[in-house]
Image (cartoon, rainbow, N blue to C red):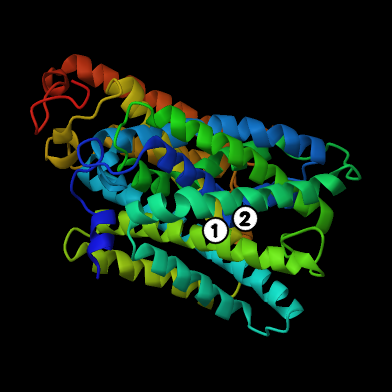
C-alpha cells in the first residue's frame, strides 16, 4: 500500500534516467501549487503588514515574482539534473551534515506554511458550509482537507501529477483563479491609498516567499524525463501565477482587511459554492503539495527507517498541528521563509557559479563532500543573523528581542545580507578551488562514469 509513497520519497536517483514526468507535468504542478492559501496570504501581508497601496501592490507583485522565479527555476534544474531529493541537493553547498541542518529549517518552513494554508481553508469552508446549513467547525474541515490530501498522496507524486493535477485540478484551479480575478478586479477601481507603505519590506517579503514552494518543486522536478528545459519551464510557471496570487491577496486585504472571506462577493448566493469548490480543488492540492514536500524533507533528515513511515509521521504531525493550533501561525511562517531564503540563494549560486551548473552524482550520493562545508554554512548563518538584526520579521516578541540595532534607513536589509553572504560564499569557494585541484579532478567524474548531458 505504501509503495507509491516510497517511490515518491525515495533516496535513490531518479530524474533523467528514470523520470516519468514531462515538462508540462511540472508546469501544471507548479501552477496549481501556487493557486492557494500561502500565495494569497503573502499578498495579503503586503497590505496588512507592510501597508502598501493598490499601486504599490501592483508594482511589488510582478517584480517579486520575476526575481523569485530564479530560485524556483534553479531548484528545478538541480533536482532534474541529479534526480536527488532536497537534502542531497544541498550537500555540495553545505556538506553532508550541514545539509541536514538546512533541511530541518526547510521542514519547519513547510510545516508552518502547511498549517497556514490548512487553517485558512478550514475557515473558508466553515463560512461557506454555514450558508448551506452544514454546521461543521473549521477544525473538522481541516481534517477533511488533510484526509483528501493524504488520499492523493497514496497515489504517489508521479501518478497524481500526471492523472489528477495535469488536467482536472489544473483546469479547475485556473477557472477559479479567473473567477477570483474578475471578482477583485471589479472592485479594485474604488481602492485608494496614500502610497506611504513600506515598499522595500513588502518586496523582500514577497521575494522570500519563493522558497515556500522550492521543496515541492524539487520533489516534482527530480522526476522529469528531461532536465534541459527545467529552469525555463519552472521559472515561467512560477512567475505568472505568483504575480496573480500576490496581487489578488493584496486586493482582498485592501477590500476587507483580511482573508476571512475568500471571495469579495460575500457568502451569499453562488459565492458559497465557489468557496467550497476553491477549498476542494485548490486547497486539497495545497495539502498534497505540502505533504509531499514534508515527506521528502523528513526522509532526507532521518537516515534510518522505512521512508514511507518516516514521511507519513511528518505528514500526520503537520496535519495534527494545523488542527490543534490556537491561531494561524502566519508570523512564524514568514520568519521561517526569511531563515531559509539565504540558504536557497547560496545553493543556487553554488550550482551556477561555483560548479558550472553541474553536480556529479558522486557529490550528491557519495561521500566526497565534507561533513560540513564551513563556507556555505557560516555564510548562511551570518546572513540570517545580520538580516534579522537589521530588519527582523516574525512574531512581535521575536522582533522586540532582536531589534537592537535600530537602523532608520529603510532598505531591504535581509535581502542585502543574503546577497552579500551569497557573493562571499562564491568568492571563498572559487578561491578554494584555485588552491586545490580536487574539485576540478572530480568535475567530470560520476558514479555512472559520464555526465547526464554527455
312, 333: nearer the viewer = 312
Left or right for 135, reference 288: right
Left or right for 133, reference 99: right
Picture quadrant where residue 8 is located: bottom left
Q: Residue furthest top?
A: 434
Q: Position of residue 92 (x, y in %)?
A: 25, 34
Q: Position of residue 386 (x, y in %)?
A: 50, 39
Question: Where 138 falls versus 251 (above or below)?
Answer: below
Q: Sort mark 1 into few (<14), some (14-19) or many (20+) by Cα contacts within 10 Å.
A: many
- Can residue 288 be seen in this snapshot? yes
Q: Residue at x 68, y 83 (%)?
A: 134
Q: Sort mark 2 into few (<14), some (14-19) or many (20+) by Cα contacts within 10 Å.
A: few
Mark 2 and mark 1: Cα distance apart in space: 14 Å
76, 89: nearer the viewer = 76
242, 153: nearer the viewer = 153
- Residue 332 is marked as 1
Quadrant in which the C terminus appears: top left
Quadrant in which the N terminus appears: bottom left
Q: Position of residue 345 (x, y in %)?
A: 43, 34
Residue that numbered label 2 is attached to:
400
Q: Earlier in the sequence, mark 2 or mark 1?
A: 1
Q: Nearer the viewer, mark 2 or mark 1?
A: 1
Amino acid at each position: 500500500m505504501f509503495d507509491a509513497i516510497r517511490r515518491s520519497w525515495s533516496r535513490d536517483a531518479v530524474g533523467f534516467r528514470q523520470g516519468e514526468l514531462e515538462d508540462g507535468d511540472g508546469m501544471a504542478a507548479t501552477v496549481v501549487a501556487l493557486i492557494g492559501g500561502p500565495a494569497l496570504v503573502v499578498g495579503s501581508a503586503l497590505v496588512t503588514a507592510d501597508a502598501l497601496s493598490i499601486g504599490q501592490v501592483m508594482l511589488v507583485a510582478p517584480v517579486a515574482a520575476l526575481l523569485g522565479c530564479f530560485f524556483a527555476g534553479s531548484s528545478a534544474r538541480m533536482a532534474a539534473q541529479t534526480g536527488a531529493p532536497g537534502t542531497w541537493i544541498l550537500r555540495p553547498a553545505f556538506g553532508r551534515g550541514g545539509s541536514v541542518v538546512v533541511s530541518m529549517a526547510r521542514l519547519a518552513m513547510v510545516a508552518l506554511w502547511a498549517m497556514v494554508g490548512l487553517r485558512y481553508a478550514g475557515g473558508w469552508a466553515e463560512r461557506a458550509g454555514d450558508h448551506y446549513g452544514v454546521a461543521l467547525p473549521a477544525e473538522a474541515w481541516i481534517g477533511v482537507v488533510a484526509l483528501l490530501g493524504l488520499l492523493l498522496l497514496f497515489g504517489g507524486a508521479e501518478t497524481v501529477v500526471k492523472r489528477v493535477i495535469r488536467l482536472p485540478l489544473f483546469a479547475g484551479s485556473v477557472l477559479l483563479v479567473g473567477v477570483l480575478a474578475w471578482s477583485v478586479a471589479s472592485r479594485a477601481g474604488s481602492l485608494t491609498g496614500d502610497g506611504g507603505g513600506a515598499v522595500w519590506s513588502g518586496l523582500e517579503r514577497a521575494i522570500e516567499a519563493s522558497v515556500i514552494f522550492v521543496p515541492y518543486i524539487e520533489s516534482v522536478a527530480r522526476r522529469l524525463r528531461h532536465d534541459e528545459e527545467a529552469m525555463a519551464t519552472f521559472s515561467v510557471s512560477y512567475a505568472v501565477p505568483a504575480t496573480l496570487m500576490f496581487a489578488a491577496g493584496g486586493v482582498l486585504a485592501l477590500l476587507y482587511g483580511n482573508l476571512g472571506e475568500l471571495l469579495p462577493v460575500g457568502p451569499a448566493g453562488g459565492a458559497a459554492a465557489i468557496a467550497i469548490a476553491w477549498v476542494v480543488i485548490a486547497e486539497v492540492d495545497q495539502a498534497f503539495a505540502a505533504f509531499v514536500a514534508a515527506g521528502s524533507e523528513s526522509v532526507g533528515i532521518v537516515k534510518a527507517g522505512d521512508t514511507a513511515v518516516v514521511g507519513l509521521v511528518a505528514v500526520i504531525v503537520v496535519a495534527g498541528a494545523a488542527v490543534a493550533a490556537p491561531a494561524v501561525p502566519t508570523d512564524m511562517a514568514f520568519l521561517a521563509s526569511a531563515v531559509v531564503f539565504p540558504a536557497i540563494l547560496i545553493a543556487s549560486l553554488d550550482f551556477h557559479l561555483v560548479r558550472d551548473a553541474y553536480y556529479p552524482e558522486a557529490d550528491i550520493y557519495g561521500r566526497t563532500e565534507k561533513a560540513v562545508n564551513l563556507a556555505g554554512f557560516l555564510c548562511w548563518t551570518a546572513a540570517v543573523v545580520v538580516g534579522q538584526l537589521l530588519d527582523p520579521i516574525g512574531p512581535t516578541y521575536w522582533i522586540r528581542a532582536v531589534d537592537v540595532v535600530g537602523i532608520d534607513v529603510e532598505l531591504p536589509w535581509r535581502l542585502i545580507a543574503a546577497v552579500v553572504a551569497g557573493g562571499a560564499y562564491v568568492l571563498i569557494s572559487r578561491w578554494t578551488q584555485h588552491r586545490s585541484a580536487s574539485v576540478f579532478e572530480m568535475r567530470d567524474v560520476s558514479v555512472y562514469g559520464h555526465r547526464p548531458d554527455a
